[in-house]
Amino acid sequence: MKLTRNRMKITKENIICHELIGLPVKVTKSAHKGYLISGTVIDETKNMIIIEGNGIKKIPKNVSTFEFTSPNGVKVEVEGKEIIGRPEDRIKNVYKIKKIRKSFK
């Protein structure tokens, strides 16, 4: 028996609950002009996104705006302040919120 996994598509509404590593990204706004780069997300920490483009750059989340391109080609712009936090905690918190919302219905 072949097991298939139901994957949720990345949209502007749910990008903060997805893994960002591996996605193409462009820094569209930042407090420092040297941070305006594009490439691929290779790592993520609580306060930084590490992008490989022309070299490797660490971009602080709190002073930047990112444009991620999902695997299906949808471009989503995200304020860095919305994705501050450890990736695993950010994903857990979204599922907790969904669970709480269901309990009130």
Image (cartoon, grey):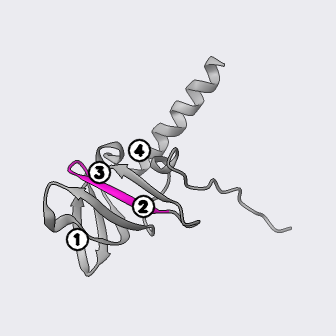
Q: Residues within 10 Å of mark 4 (few under 14, many from 20)?
A: few
Distance (Cα) linking label 3 and label 1 = 15 Å
Residue closest to the eye, 4 or 13: 13
**Left/right of residue 57 with respect to residue 3 in the rendered view:** left
Is 44 displayed left or right of 5 in the figure?
A: left
Q: Position of residue 38 (x, y in %)?
A: 31, 71
- Residue at 23% x, 61% y is 59
Residue wearing tag 1: 57
User: Residue 68 got which mark?
Assistant: 2
Q: Does label 4 or label 3 sit earlier along the sequence? A: 3
Q: Which residues are magenta?
A: 61-69
Q: Give the quadrant of residue 27.
A: bottom left
Q: Is 32 positioned to the left or the right of 90 in the image?
A: left
Q: Which residue is mark 4?
A: 89
Residue type, numbered disc 1: Lys
Contact (Cβ within 8 Å) of mark 3 with mark 2: no
